[in-house]
Image (cartoon, helix red, strand yellow):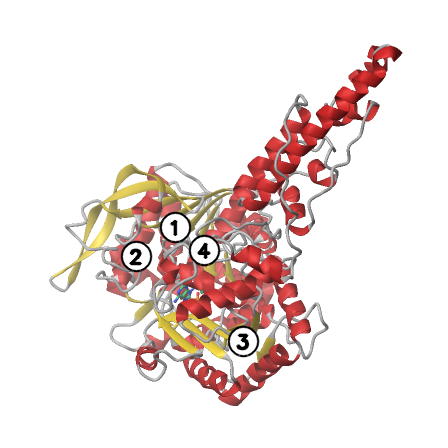
């Protein structure tokens, strides 16, 4: 390893750790050799201990041989200097990984015996921001042929010739208390991702691991998972999971042999559960995560039971069960009503609501897919869906049950939390939360309850839970609904290191972004103009995302001479498919890509000047943050997490502002914000470039949000 005490023969570059060295090589002309002679050589080339340095003068040669000795040292230094220059030149023509190795070897070599021969010296790198630098970046770009699936092939034929610095820092502070956290989730990026849920669980889990916590994700073993991308995948155990089975219109209680596997996905330890015999039932089978050939409600109810049964059988007592979305809510009900009486006593439950659009409707008899009867939850204060009172049958709502039976409930942004509590987003669930008798008791609890008191009510010594204690749970939920803003995985989304891009870039070295734009324009067969702003939308195509505004933006871009690129899929995609194949087929400024592609998403973010997110509601939203990280300027509707992350240029100071926002849900409101952004791009390019750099430098990682989650975990965890 290179050490900080490395020799200074080449000045600052040689003193720095490898990453700093790479930065300097990218931004400066080749450092000039500073050859020193005599006494300095000993201290510079061969690091010594303090005692050695003190004794060094005593070992000097007799005066008659000093000159000869100095000449010899000078020759050796010149040879070594040439060798180091040659190594530096090779760093410039190789990639970051080679650069790190070369930097380490250069420094180590300098500290070793001074031998070497003269080597070829290359010219210093071109200065960033010049045409010469762009030419240098272009070396090795595998330019795509228009109309091909270029995103499926490598974007470069050789590594980047220079390092653009930037990069991410994944160093996290270590927390003093290490907690055992188990997530229950239906999605986990990168291989089991449909939308932001997968990104969020992955990013939070990875960051908490880095902070020193023991984190495991329990998730379904979907048939469609690419198993070759699960590191160390191996069988763990078989367990018998109680389960109701639909038979002749009745649900019969039985058990289902379940296979549990272990592995690591994207650096996160996972437990994968599935029926041992897939031929006997089709749970989690099919080519897609959702909407496969299986019954989702039955599968996720079974999954919740299987995850808890696994924890019991393996004797684990995590501090926290962190549940996500309706698919995992039944685990909260089952934990408190069944497993807390079966020896699983330590966990406290956190539920994160990523989206209240789906809340998990469930007939009482269907709840028996978990192996226990749903009737006991059919009260207003537990999980009854009030909208169905008087219907035959009355139904349960899993999200409501999850809220009631969790110790803390979070949403994914502060504004969405407010919207949920104020009723804008919670709909009928809000009426439950805001009932007067509930409200008055909330105040009582706010005045009286503390964590220790709460601990008594949930201690393993009182497993037989009363209606009263459920009410307490419920009230505590209200008290604890809080919005913790999502972060993004800044290693996964890092324009300075992203290997899917034709050129890397950073706020300090933004040139590569122009190349990414040209690359995308060429690949998609668009007009290759740097002066036409590329407006990008990357989204699930569902009503939540503002389908009518996405369409309106497309036509506005057409009118205003901008380019529009959509990457999206979902059940509203029919109209976009039709436009892609007819009206805008081979259009020079519009491309509608109705599909899902992770690699194309990376390339579009990198090429985009503007990232558009006109959602009707948005619990947090990741695309505006990823877009910013890649130097795009967001244009968003001011709702939920979009309101928390985007500050309008026209109402915020430079440096604080990062995009354009609008309030209304009509086309006129959208046009107002989009037009302002397009004018800014066209008429004030220097200020636009600054804005883009500000966005790239914005702190968007999980550092801050993970600290909030850890604080929440600690506030409810048992010792
Ligand atoms: P949501 O969770 O509601 O879908 P988010 O903005 O929170 O919305 O997260 C969306 C995530 O899914 C982002 O990582 C985005 O890049 C990705 N994504 C959405 N649609 C596509 C697509 N068609 N192809 C590739 N990635 C997509």
Q: Mark 1 = which residue?
A: 335
Tag 4–tag 2 contact (CB < 8 Å)? no
Q: Mark 2 = which residue?
A: 301
- In terms of image quadrants, where is residue 298? bottom left
Q: Please, is residue 392 above or below residue 718 in the view? A: below
Measured Cα–Cα span from mark 4 to mark 2: 38 Å
The mark nearer the N terminus, 4 or 2, is 2
- Is residue 613 left or right of 595 when viewed as pictured? right
Q: Nearer the viewer, mark 1 or mark 2?
A: 2
Q: Mark 3 = which residue?
A: 533
The mark nearer the N terminus, 1 or 4, is 1
Q: Mark 4 = which residue?
A: 500
Asked if residue 718 shows in the view, the reply is: no
In the image, 349 versus 607, the foreground residue is 607
Q: Residue at x 74, y 33 (%)?
A: 8
The mark nearer the N terminus, 3 or 1, is 1
Q: Please, is residue 609 above or below residue 162 in the view? A: below
Label 4 CB-ligand 1 distance < 8 A: no
User: Which SS class for mark 1?
Assistant: helix
User: Which SS class for mark 3?
Assistant: loop
């Amino acid at each position: 390893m290179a050490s900080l005490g490395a020799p200074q023969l080449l000045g600052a570059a040689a003193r720095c750790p490898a990453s700093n060295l790479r930065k300097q090589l990218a931004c400066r002309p080749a450092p000039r050799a500073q050859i020193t002679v005599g006494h300095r050589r000993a201290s510079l080339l061969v690091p010594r201990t303090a005692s050695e340095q003190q004794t060094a003068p005593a070992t000097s040669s007799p005066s008659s041989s000093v000159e000869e000795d100095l000449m010899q040292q000078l020759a050796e230094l010149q040879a070594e200097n040439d060798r180091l220059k040659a190594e530096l030149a090779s760093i410039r023509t190789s990639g970051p990984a080679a650069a790190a190795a070369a930097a380490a070897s250069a420094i180590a070599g300098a500290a070793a015996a001074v031998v070497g021969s003269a080597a070829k010296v290359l010219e210093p790198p071109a200065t960033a921001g010049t045409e010469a630098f762009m030419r240098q970046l272009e070396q090795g770009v595998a330019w795509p042929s228009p109309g091909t699936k270029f995103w499926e092939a490598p974007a470069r034929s050789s590594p980047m010739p220079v390092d653009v610095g930037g990069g991410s820092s994944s160093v996290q502070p270590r927390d003093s208390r290490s907690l055992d956290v188990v997530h229950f989730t239906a999605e986990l990026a990168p291989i089991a991702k449909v939308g932001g849920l997968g990104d969020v669980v992955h990013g939070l889990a990875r960051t908490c691991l880095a902070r020193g916590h023991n984190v495991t994700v329990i998730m379904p073993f979907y048939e469609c998972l690419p198993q070759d991308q699960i590191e160390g995948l191996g069988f763990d155990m078989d367990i018998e999971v109680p389960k109701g089975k639909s038979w002749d219109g009745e649900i019969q209680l039985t058990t289902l042999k379940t296979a549990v596997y272990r592995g690591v996905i994207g650096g996160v330890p996972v437990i994968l559960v599935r029926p041992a015999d897939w031929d006997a039932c089709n749970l989690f089978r099919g080519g897609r995560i959702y909407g496969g050939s299986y019954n989702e409600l039955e599968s996720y109810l079974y999954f919740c039971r299987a995850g808890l049964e696994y924890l019991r059988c393996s004797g684990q007592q995590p501090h926290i069960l962190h549940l996500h979305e309706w698919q995992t809510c039944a685990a909260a009900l089952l934990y408190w009503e069944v497993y807390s009486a079966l020896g699983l006593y330590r966990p406290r439950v956190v539920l994160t609501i990523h989206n209240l659009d789906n809340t998990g409707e469930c007939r009482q008899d269907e709840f028996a897919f978990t192996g226990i009867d749903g009737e006991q939850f059919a009260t207003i204060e537990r999980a009854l869906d009030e909208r169905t009172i008087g219907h035959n049958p009355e139904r349960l709502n899993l999200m409501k049950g999850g809220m009631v039976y969790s110790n803390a409930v979070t949403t994914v942004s502060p504004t969405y939390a407010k919207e949920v509590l104020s009723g804008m987003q919670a709909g009928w669930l809000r009426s439950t939360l805001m009932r007067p008798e509930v409200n008055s008791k909330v105040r009582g609890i706010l005045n009286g309850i503390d964590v220790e008191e709460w601990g008594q009510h949930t201690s393993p010594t009182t497993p037989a839970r009363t209606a009263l204690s459920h009410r307490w749970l419920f009230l505590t939920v209200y008290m604890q609904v809080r919005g913790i803003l999502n972060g993004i995985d800044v290693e996964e989304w890092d324009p300075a290191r992203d290997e899917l891009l034709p050129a890397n870039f950073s706020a300090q070295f933004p040139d590569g972004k122009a190349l990414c734009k040209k690359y995308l324009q060429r690949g998609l067969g668009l007009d290759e103009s740097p002066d036409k702003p590329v407006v990008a939308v990357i989204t699930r195509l569902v009503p939540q995302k503002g389908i009518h505004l996405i369409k309106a933006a497309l036509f506005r871009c057409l009118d205003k001479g901008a380019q529009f690129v959509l990457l999206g899929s979902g059940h509203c995609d029919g109209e976009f498919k039709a436009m892609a194949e007819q009206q805008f087929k081979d259009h020079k400024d519009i491309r509608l890509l109705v599909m899902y592609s992770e690699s194309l998403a990376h390339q579009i973010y990198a090429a985009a000047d503007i990232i558009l997110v006109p959602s009707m509601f948005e619990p947090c939203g990741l695309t505006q943050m990823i877009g910013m990280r890649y130097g795009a300027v967001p244009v968003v509707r001011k709702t939920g997490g979009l309101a928390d992350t985007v500050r309008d240029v026209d109402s915020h100071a430079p440096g604080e502002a990062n995009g354009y926002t609008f309030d209304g849900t009509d086309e006129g409101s959208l046009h107002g914000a989009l037009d302002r952004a397009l004018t800014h791009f066209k008429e004030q390019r220097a200020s636009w470039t600054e804005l883009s750099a500000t966005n790239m430098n914005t702190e968007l990682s999980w550092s801050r949000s993970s600290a909030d989650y850890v604080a929440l975990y600690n506030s409810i965890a048992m010792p």
